[in-house]
Structure formats: C-alpha cells, structure tokens
Image: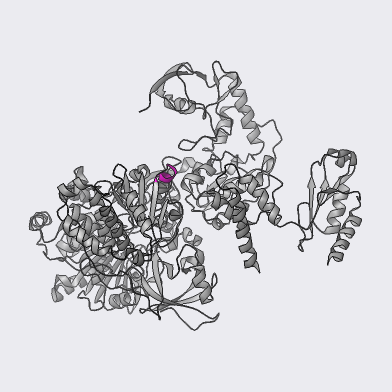
Amino acid sequence: MGEICACLELEKTREIVKKYEGKQGVLVHILQDVQLEFGYLPENAMNVIAKELDISLAHAYGVASFYTRFYFTPRGENIIRVCVGTACHVRGSHAILEEFETELGLKDGETSDDLKFTLETVSCVGCCALAPVVVINDVVSKERNPKRIVTKLRGEEEQDD
Amino acid sequence: MSQLITLKIEGREVTVPDGITIIEAATHTGIDIPHLCYCKGLESTGACRLCLVELEGAKELVVSCRRKVKSGMVVRTRTDRVLEARRFVVELILSNHPGDCMSCERNGTCELQKYAYELGIEKTRFTVKDLGYPVDTSNPLIERNYNLCILCGRCIRICKTQGSDILDFMQRGMVTKVTTPLDKPLQEVDCDFCGSCVAVCPVAALLERSRKFRGREWELNKTKTACSYCGCSCDLLINTKKGEIVKVTTEEKTDYLCARGRFGWDYVQNGERLKVPRIKRDGKLVECTWDEALDYVARRLSKIKDTHGPHSLGGIVSAHHTNEVIYLFQRFMRACLGTNNVDSSVRLLSYPAVADFIEVFGTPDVACSLAEIEEADTLFIVHSDVDMSSPFVGVEIKRASKREAKLVTIDPRSTRVAEISHLYLRLKPGTEAILLNGIAHCMLEEGLYSREFVETKCSNMDQFKEFLTKQARDVERKTGVSKESIAKAARFYGESDKKVVIIFSPEASDIQSVHAIINLLLLTGRVKGGVFPYMPLCNLRGAADMGALSEFYPGCKVVDDSTTRRKLERIYGAALPDKPGLSSLEMIQSGTTISGLYILGENPVVSFPNTTETVKALTSLDFLVVQDIFLTETAKLADVVLPGISFAESSGTFTNSEGKVKVINRAIDPLARPDWKIIAELSSKMGYPLDYDSEEKIMDEIKTLIPAYSGGSWDRKERYSFIMADMGRSYETPDSTHPYLLMTGPTKFDFYDGSRTSRSRISQLEPFQGEYLGINPEDAKSLGITEGSKVLVSSKRGSITVAAKIDESLPLGLVFMPAHFSGSNVLTTSDIEPTTRTRKIQLSAVAISQLEEVGEVTNE
C-alpha cells in the first residue's frame, strides 16, 4: 500500500512541476499546488520538486518552511483553528484552546493518529468583532463550544461512513 | 588583470584592484572591519550588518562586504555612529546566545566574543533568550549546538560549494534555524562530513567532537603536514596538546578537507597500535625486543638467500609510506638482498597508467594540477565515483561545473557526478575502452582532431586508423551507448580551442581504457595538462618514482638499462640484478617462487584479489615478515611483526596525484620505530649498512638520482606513438550460474584495505559497517531482497554473506561491494594480465541468493 502511495506522489508531483516548465520563480506556486493535491508536502514530493527544479532539497525546504501555511506532515480531514490574536485572547480564546486540547487529546499543531482532526492556533483571521474566533475547515464557526463542535464533526463523519 | 583604483580608508590612501569590496580593500591595507557572516573565500550575503561603515556622501551606513570600491571613495570604519550600530548588532546577537564562555571550546577564538570585547560590551541590554534546542551528538564527528548559532549562514554557503548542499535557513523569525531538510541528523541526509561547516563557524555552534574538553585553542600546537589517504594529499594542520592529536584543521578556514582528512586521523591514537615487535612461537605471535626481532629476521632472510638464492626473496611496500621509506625499502631489496622482486601498491592501483605514461611520454609526470581541473572548459570523467576515491577532485569538478564548465561522464553507475553532467554516457559495465575508441573513431571521421600534431609528432597514425576502424564496429551494441551520444562526446572532446581534461581512475581502469585515453590525448595534441589520473593512495606517484616496481629503478628507469644500473651500483656499492623481478601479484600466488617475503604496510589479505589464494600463498611461505602499525589480517599470518609508525609521526615527503612533492612533518612522537630506521637497522644486521642520520639525508640521495626531485624536470619524449592492444574482456562473462557482475570500489568513509579507517570513528558512518552488497532495486525485487536482507554472494572463488543495500545508481545486472573489508576480494579473481602483470579482470561474475533468517553459511 505504502509503495503505491509513494508512486502516486511522485507521478502527481512530476505532473505539477511539468506545468511550470520553463518558467522562473515557480517554487512557491509548485509547493502550493502540491499541498493542494496532498494536503501537505510529502517528502517524496519535495525530493521530486528539488530534483526537477535543479535546486537543493535544503533550499526547497528552506523556502517552504518560511511560510507557516506549508505543512510537512499529513493533516486531518477536519482542521480546527483557534484564533489567539489580541482580541480573541482578551475574549478568552485560551480556555477554548484548552478545551479543544482535552477533547481531542491533541496539542497545538498536532494531528490525530486517525488523521481526522488537526488542531492549530492562528494569530488573527481578520474578524475580531466575532472574537473569540474558531475556524472549522476554513469557515468561521458560529458554534464556539469545543465539545459540541467536535461531537458534531464526529457525527458528520459517522453519517458519511 | 583588473584596473587599479585609489580610495581612502581611515584617512589612508589605498590602491586596490577595481571590483573588490570595501572589506577586501580594508584587509589589503591591514584594517580589520568586524564581520560575522562575511568569510574570505565565500560569497558575501551582507546578513549580519556588523561590517557597516560610513561612506562620505552616503546618508546611510553601508555594508562593506557587499559594496564595491569606487575611485575616490572615502571610508570611515570606526566613527561613533558606526560603533554604535555595531554594538546594537552584537547586543542583539548576544540576546540569543548564552554567554557560556567559561568552558566553551571556542573561547579565545570565538569571533562573536572577539567583537563583543572590542566593542566593550559587558552585557547585552536585551533579555537573553534560551532557545532550548537539544544538542545534536547523534553522529560521531560533528556536534551541532544551535543554541549558540548566530545565523551567519557561512555553513550554508560552504556546504553549497564543497559539501553536499544539505543546509539552509529553516522557518523564520525567532525560530529560524540553520539545519537540514526536516531537521534530520546529518548522517541521514547524505552529508559528506567534510567538516567545512565546522571550519567556518565563527562560534561554537559546530564543533569537532574529538576536541571537546581536550584543549583550548591557545594550548594547541599546530604542525603543517599533508594527508596520507588519497592521492590529493591535501595540506593539513595537526593540532596537538601534550603530544596528543586533538583535531585537524586547515591553513585557511575555507580550504577543503574530506571526512577522511579532517576526521579520519584517530586511528593514529587507537589502542590497537603495535608498539613492540612480535615473533611467532608455537603458532602464536609473542612480544619480543627489537634486537631479537631484527636479528631473527636478518638470520632467516640470509638463510633463505643462501639456500635458494636472492630471487627467492621478495618485498612489497604500500604507497601510503613516504618517498624516503619507499626509496630505502627498494634500495634494501635490490642492494642488500640482491633482487628486483620489489613491488608496491602501484601494481594493483595504478600500474597500467604509470606504464603507459612512461612508454608514450617517457615520464610518469603527465597529470595536470588540481587547479587546472577547476579552470577547464570541459571535463571528461571516466569512472565518476571520483568523489568517493579522491573527494577533493570531486569538489574541483563541482566548482568547474558551477563555473559553467561542461561535464561529460562515462560510467555505468549514475553517481552524483554523473547527475550534474551535461552528457552522461551510461555504458555497459567493462566497455570503457570500446566506448573511448568509438569516440576517437568518430573524431577521426568528423575531422575533429589536430591534424598538425598527429602529422608532425605521431608516428603510427595509419595503423591507428586501422585499429580504430576495427574497434569501432558495433560500438553501439557493445557499449549500449547511442551513436548520437558518442558523436556528441566526440564533438565535446574535439573542440580544439577548449581546455579539456580527462579525469580517470587508474585503479578502476583496465589497461585498454588507459591506452584509449592516451590515444585521445595524442589525437588532439593535449599531451600537457590534458589528463588527471586520480590516485587512490597518497603516494602512488612517489612509489613509482622511487622504484618500488620490479621493472623500474628510481626515476622510472627500466632495470635493463645498464647506464642507470652502473650509476646505481656505484652509489649503492653493490652489484644489482639486471632482470625485472616479480610483480606483487606474482609474488603472492599459488606456485610462487618466493620463499621469504617482507611486506611493509601493505595488507594483501584484504587488498589483493582472490583472498583464498592469497592466504594460501602467504601461509605456504617459509618466512613472512610484516611491518605495520596494526596487527592487520596479513600481519596475523606473519612470522615476525615489526611495528612501524603512522604519517602523523613521520617526516618526509609524498608525491601526490598532481606530481607535487608534499612535505610531511612529525606532529607527535613515534609510538614505535620509524620505518626507515627499521629498514636501515635490518640492513646493517645483514651486513649492508645504510647510514643515514635523518630522512633528509635519504631525500638528498633521491635528489641525486631523480632530477625532478631537486628542482629539475623529467625528460619527456618529443615524438609519440598511438598505443594499441586488443586484449579481450576485462570482466568475467556472466552466465546462468553467475549472472551478475560485481564491481568493488571505494566508499565515502572507508579506505583502501580498511586497516586505518576501520579503527577510526569515520567508519561508523558507513551503512552496514561498510560490509554490504549494493544492488539495483529491480534486481533486488526479482530476488526477493529488501534493504538489509542477508544475502549470499558467490563466485567461482568463494562466497560471503553480507547485507543488501538498495542502490538506484546501479544499472541492472551490476552489483557493488566496498573494497575495504575482508570479504569482497573473496569473490574476485587474481588472473594476471601478462604484459602489465597486474590483475586482468576488473569485474567478477557472481551469483546472489537471499538467505533465510538463520543460515548455516559461514564466511569462507
């Protein structure tokens, strides 16, 4: 199984890199496309990118790790972001974060072993009027109770299954 | 030459070449501008902002490591404004750098400490933040403590130019860290461990682990000497404290050393070093006094000489010894024992090249310099594992390629060098000669050769044409390289106005490919500076020059030349034999006529082909004396073992691949007896005194015999002949019982017979302790082998069990085994090629099978 996945990663990444053939300054675009494809930047894919662009792997990782929006480990199906910016902090975002941590058994930045959830903090999402803000899968959540949010997401999972 | 311009620095008029930076101009004048990220020899980035200076007419302070000088510029380097800016920079850096100077190894040489002191900073005004990174001590050589890192990026830049380009700034802001992809340990990211990053680090973020708590910088003595591993024999400084080696460094921070040179010295102080002679009594080697040992050796050798004649004695010397030791050894063998049976590592490692050079050019001195490789327009690389065998040559190739030189690589393995090549000719294993002849043929057909040179200087062009026409039949089919690629290579090589150098391994080349390489040189008239044979041992050139070959006297004069012989007889005061002696391979084979053998530093049990035969021949000798620093596999079989000394304890000279004579200086006291003294004493005991006070006296004698060693030059031929021979295959043909071809060769961290590297920490970096079989992933799959599987590898000679290592660089059907452990040569054949009297077969046919977890098979 692992082998098939690796092959697929290599194939797909090569296809993505090929789209940018002959163009300059394309590394970040490629990284974005690859992350869109796999949800993160797999090591195999990074190797292909470095090789195809004739740059060192270290350079590729140097650029990718500069941006916090690039990930190097697989991400959960549901991404829970708790804003800890100034406004949210004042309105008690830390308590919310802690409750998520207990509920999911994850720390900030971690992904559950079953790859269902990723929990992370952000510094501001630009809607401080709604503080404290919780963003579920790129949508600002109306619900702020971590327990209810997680239960709901788990419920949806089950329905899908 | 660039133009000179004049500017003012600190009120002084200075005239410097145009195009340099302000900081370089200041250094010219003896003014030191503080700097951290700038490092002479590396590209400037202007990151640290410490080298800020004031420029008259400029509003802002300027970065002096980036700003180029201009005529009439007025620069001030120490104004209040500049100093305040620098203080701010240093204080900011100190806020991220724990001030643990008390027991820091770099105390006294730390560049940050130096500037903090110079700027009068007692404490930073900012809160000091503890970054809390764990210190990486997961590899045996380099300690990485990023809590001390000041993010100057020097290590990143030097890793790009002379390492494997595995470092960069990762993440950003406060958590920026210089590290490897995914912060992996160095040993997992193909690090070469050249240690260049350690050398340029201005603080103690990167350190040699060997030096920890073993001496502060000001307590260290530095002895300039040269490396005793590969043929580059790079300059190095041995740092000692109280007679113990602490580390090895270079004169300039950015000078290159490979892992072996920088870190591979610790065998010198290994507890297994022999200090006392041993004699075999009742099958056991027991310690004895020097007099006992030498008297015994003298008696036994004399007895054999008296009963069986001088030619029943033989001597083999290793080319990692100095010229002085090798020279004295051959004098002892020839003048005292009276035989030409004196040979050396040259036979197996470089003889075809030496013999061809002497035959065609009249001199062994044909190689270009290492600097010329870097300057070349085009490099032809035959055997591209050069960065394993001679890492510095690999670095020069890389530098040339960065400078837009064209690389053409000929190798069945897609090595790192092959991967950066413009043209990679992936040929079938063992068909180098055919391919090179094919290229030559194509050059003839397309007129891509120097007609003038060939007509005026070469005598046998017509025969050569005929020869090539015959050789060029079916090149495509035989080599697996397309006609188009061959034509491309021919055009690359045939470009007459370009400086082209052929780099090849004399160890891996069969005699026919050496012929073919020399013919290419003649075709284009590139007879000077057109070739670089990289020698796998430091003094292979010297050993040949010194006469450690059974058919050559010192100065590479053939032994049947009576003029040289008479001259030598006069100097040596003894009659010399006039027939070539036996080659080292001939001395150690079944049915050998040798009864008594003196081996100095060589370890045939590991380094000679066909181990089983070698051991049989060695054990059937009447008398074997081995002089070495360790009880090697060969020494264990000896009747007497004499402990010699390592390069760190020696004085003398090596002659490197370029033909440069490198000076070796004693850095620590000898742990046993200097090798030349042992030879001299033994000779005296046998009634032929060799009276020298020192190594220099031996060199004086060498100088009288070889003009090139006393500032003169080698005699060179003025007319040349193409060199032709069709000797058939240099590989065993695979068949259904032995379907794979085995290549043995160098690896990154092990070396030659492994006797030195296996006793050094660097060998810990080799996968599977350096004992493995490299195999293509598809071959592995079809055999059901995965990484680390135990496999039985067998040939007609024997079989061994090793771990499998999946290696994508290998083509189908070719497997690889490191040459440095007592195993790979169990499989190889010792068939002798009659003209060169060295091995005929480079690649052996083997069978591979996977072993069950619990196997009954033992190593033979």
Residue B556 visible in the picture: no
- Residue A49 appears in the rendering: yes
Q: Is residue B249 left or right of residue B382?
A: right
What x and y, as percent, mark residue B700?
19, 47
Residue B248 in the figure: left or right of residue B368: right
Quadrant the N terminus of chain B occupies: top left
Q: Tell me where residue B65 appears, x and y as whole percent.
A: 51, 30
Q: Nearer the viewer, residue B765 or A19?
A: A19
Between residues B28 and B297, which one lies in front from this camera angle? B28
Q: Position of residue B832 (x, y in %)?
A: 25, 71
Q: Quadrant of residue B337?
A: bottom left
- How does the figure colour the protein chain or chains? one colour
Magenta segment: B399-405
* Residue drawn at (82%, 39%) of the image: A126
In this rendering, the answer to whether B511 lies above or below B859 is: above
How far from the left and from the top, in percent, is residue B46? Answer: 56, 32
* In magenta stretch: residue B702: no
Residue situated furthest bottom in the rendering: B856
Which quadrant of the rendered structure holds the C terminus of chain B?
Answer: bottom left
| Nearest to the observer: residue B808 or residue B295 | B808
Front-most of residues B844 and B651: B844
